[in-house]
Amino acid sequence: MHTGNPAVPADMFADVLAQVTDFVRTRVLPRENEIMETDAVPADVRRQAADMGLFGYALPQEWGGLGLDVVQDVEVAMELGYTSLALRSMFGTNNGIAGQVLVGFGTDEQKARWLPRMAAGEVVASFALTEPGAGSDPSGLRTTAVRDGDGWVLNGSKRFITNATDAQLFVTFARLDPAPPTGAGIAVFLVPAEAPGVTVGVKDVKMGQEGSRTADVSLGGVRVGSDALVGERPEVGYRAAMTALARGRLHLAGVAVGAAQRALDESVAHAASATQGGTTIGEFQLVQAMLADMATDTMAGRALVREAARGYLSGADRRLGPSSAKLFCTEMAGRVADLAVQVHGGSGYMRGVPVERIYRDVRLLRVYEGTSEIQRLIVGGGLLRGSRSGR
């Protein structure tokens, strides 16, 4: 199994991060309302993101990516979280849960076929795991894979699949039928979007994150060859899902920190300029208290996600740390966004004001790639298992 890309040298990464920050602050922030109103990321912004290598920043350099490791990934995520979350969603599946399945578990032939085009932004890959009865816990999958000669036939339905309407590849999780005598019985298949039997539904209408596209995907008798099975062994599927989700949780924790920082910055600027009764509201101690709570939460989240990323990269903790970071940081972003609206008063409830959008955008962070409740079960259960084993 691939255990992580070699780190990009610090000076080179500093340059990458500076470019991402400049792109976010100068090119994307001025277009946030446009993204919200049109429910789409402008084509020129997408082109620039592709030219910068953002569709493959976490993919290995040997396959055309930038090769950032997970510690560097979360630093980028904190910058991407500073603006409309539709931006990072556009290339998030390539770098994250879909791309990392291929990086960690794909064959050399599978990597050569898909990763260079994913890194270039020519291919968008979607992570087709979630179903009406299975999401945070893949064990409830109902999509089936039946062996047929030297290939497989897939049947089932997927829900809330990010980038489904734009994807050329679905990294699809299915339950083996009949079930094997051992193991989870879940396999992963590379399903081209144009394969007969693949149907993508209409774009979902969501509370927030306008410009980020999700949709249902139906698989009706979809036939794929033996070379579509990730890793060429059915039993790797469940492990692939858990590994990709753990890294993805660290990324989302970083995104949450970035969104919280933006909400804080907007609130400080508002408190320093808005007046009530001839006094700037920042002079009021209760407003200062809200800003202090927001700042403390954001700093704590930033420290936690960095520490958890270091633990993941070293291999010391690839389960409890990512879940703890995702739990705290996404819940924290919700608290900070709520306080940001409060600091802004009535204006914070108006469309077009950044904190109103942030309030809606961050709500989803506590749901996808494992709900807060699932993270609590992972952390609590893991602590107890560690105690029983004497660790």
Image (tube, helix red, strand yellow):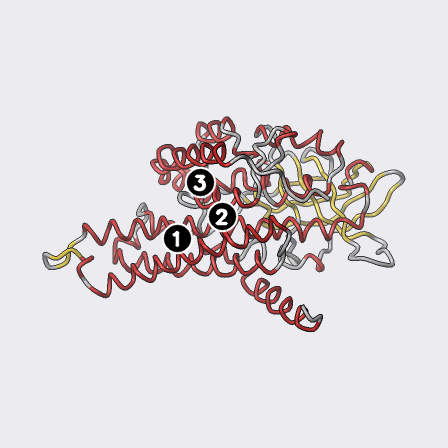
The numbered disc on residue 205 is: 2
Residue 52 x/y as whole percent: 49, 29
Residue 244 x/y as whole percent: 64, 48
Residue at x-position 35% and y-position 40%? 33
Between circles 2 and 1, the one closer to the viewer is 1
In primary-sequence order, the first of circles 1 and 3 is 3
- Image quadrant in which you'd find residue 381: bottom right
What residue did someone put label 3 on? 39
Please state the total of marks drawn on the protein image. Answer: 3
* Residue type highlighted by circle 1: Ala
- Image quadrant in which you'd find residue 288: bottom left
* Residue type highlighted by circle 3: Asp
Label 3 secondary element: loop
10 Å crowding of disc 1: few (<14), some (14-19), many (20+) = many
Residue 219 x/y as whole percent: 71, 44
* Quarter of the rendering occupied by the C terminus: bottom right
Horizontal side of residue 91 vs 354, given as left or right: right
What residue did someone put label 1 on? 260
10 Å crowding of disc 2: few (<14), some (14-19), many (20+) = few
Task: State how far apart marks 2 and 3 are (Cα).
Answer: 10 Å
In primary-sequence order, the first of circles 2 and 3 is 3
Outermost residue to the left? 278
